[in-house]
Image (tube, rainbow, N blue to C red):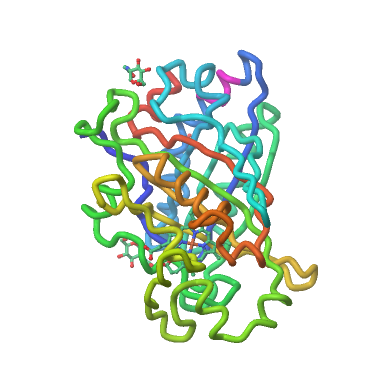
Amino acid sequence: MSAGQPVDTGLTRSATFLVFSVLQTDSSMRAVRSVLSSVPDITKNISIRDTNANLTCVVGIGSRAWDSLMRLPRPAELHPFPEVRGAKQTAVSTPGDLLFHIRSERRDMCFELERQLIEKLGDTVQLEDQTVGFRYFDARDLLGFVDGTANPVGPSAISDVVMISEEDENSNATTVGGSYVVVQKYLHDLKAWKALSIEQQEAIIGRTKLDNIELEDADDGQQQSHKTLATIEDASGKEHAVLRDNMPFGSPSTSQYGTYFIAYSRHLWVVEKMMERMFLGNPRGLHDRILDFSTPITGSTFFAPSLSILKRLGD
Ligand code: HEM
Ligand SMILES: *[C@@H]1O[C@H](CO)[C@@H](O)[C@H](O)[C@H]1NC(C)=O
Ligand SMILES: *[C@@H]1O[C@H](CO)[C@@H](O)[C@H](O)[C@H]1NC(C)=O
Ligand SMILES: *[C@@H]1O[C@H](CO)[C@@H](O)[C@H](O)[C@H]1NC(C)=O
């Protein structure tokens, strides 16, 4: 069993999401490989200054960069984020060769890791997006709802959802211990959202606001809530979850209010199915009403390989 990267460490008070494109030259690729292989050591060096702060970093590699950067066969499902064009919103597909998902209880530890990574990467990369997320009260999104409740709980349930194992069809030395990762940066129209009644908001999410109790699904053929549209079953009726570590971000002074969505899964198709049901609707036409108040401005897919593959990259 290959050890995975620290995917399953849970929500922290602070998180930083970095997405880069890599310059398509041999020397950039070589330099980036060396930095990526040292990420576990860089993280450890900072985390020993306060081990209680639970500093972690997960590295993801995008489809375009995979071949030249990794020099390994491609994970079977890895491809660029597919745009989903809905009636109300389009799930846009934006560039991303590298993802760094930095988490800690301490904002300064996230900052320090970001600083060292940027310094080491130098001019081999181009920044596509940097988002700093924070915990908002009892892990609520800026729409005011607790986010992350339906996540799998406990090491074995989490690893069952996120980590590719030897038993998986198509799995092999390249993919075992790894996960697919999908990110999307959303901006909210909070003014319009707050004009809704609490009952209308609860019907959109599918949970009560104050005490976070799950509501009944709507009847078949009716407008479904977010939680129902994001519940995926395969042909045999088996439910497929993902692990979400969404964080709020924003700046009241510039009226920017957002949710950084991030999902880990051992099957990329599960996240893509969720996207389709949200943006196109199920039944078709009845899209997720969260999207009447939320606009995705990025969308990228990555593969987070096992720790041993990451560490060997510098060889
Ligand atoms: C504007 C962005 C989003 C916001 C604010 C948001 C918020 C929420 C909230 C409040 C819940 C209920 C609590 C919970 O179970 O975590 C939830 C559930 C969920 N969301 Fe989202 N979400 C967003 C986007 C997405 C996207 C893009 C996906 C997948 C592609 C997704 C997948 C899920 C799943 C799988 C659940 C759990 C469903 C269940 O089994 O009950 N969410 N989300
Ligand atoms: C970790 O810290 C040690 C001691 O300060 C240093 O020698 C080493 O280069 C650092 N490693 C990385 C990857 O930054
Ligand atoms: C750090 O992580 C451990 C293990 O997941 C957890 O038990 C602990 O509460 C976390 N520390 C803080 C300060 O949240
Ligand atoms: C692993 O699976 C992928 C995709 O199915 C394939 O391209 C590759 O050759 C396989 N072998 C290794 C060692 O990764």
The residue at 79%/72% (across/down) is: 253
Task: Name the spot of residue 82 as percent of width and height, x first.
Answer: 57, 37
Extreme residue in the right direction: 254
Tell me how many marks there are: 0
Judged by its main secondary structure, the magenta piece is: helix
Task: Name the spot of residue 226 as percent of width and height, x first.
Answer: 49, 65
Task: Name the spot of residue 40 as percent of width and height, x first.
Answer: 41, 39
Camera-nearest residue between 209 and 7: 209
What range of the chain is rendered magenta? 29-33
Looking at the picture, does residue 206 appear above or below residue 27?
A: below
Asked whether residue 31 is drawn in magenta, I would say: yes
Looking at the picture, does residue 51 appear above or below residue 122?
A: below
Residue 134 is drawn in which quadrant?
Answer: bottom right
Res. 110 in view: no
The residue at 46%/51% (across/down) is: 274
Task: Name the spot of residue 16 as percent of width and height, x first.
Answer: 57, 53
Res. 301 in view: yes
The residue at 50%/36% (across/down) is: 302
Asked whether residue 130 is drawn in magenta, I would say: no
The residue at 25%/48% (across/down) is: 160
Camera-nearest residue between 167 and 53: 167
Locate residue 134 relative to residue 23 in the image: left or right. left
User: Quadrant of the image for the C terminus?
Assistant: top left
Extreme residue in the front direction: 221
Locate residue 7 relative to residue 36 in the image: left or right. left
- Name the quarter showing ligand 3: bottom left
Camera-nearest residue between 275 and 259: 275
Looking at the picture, does residue 245 appear above or below residue 310?
A: below
User: Quadrant of the image for the N terminus?
Assistant: top left
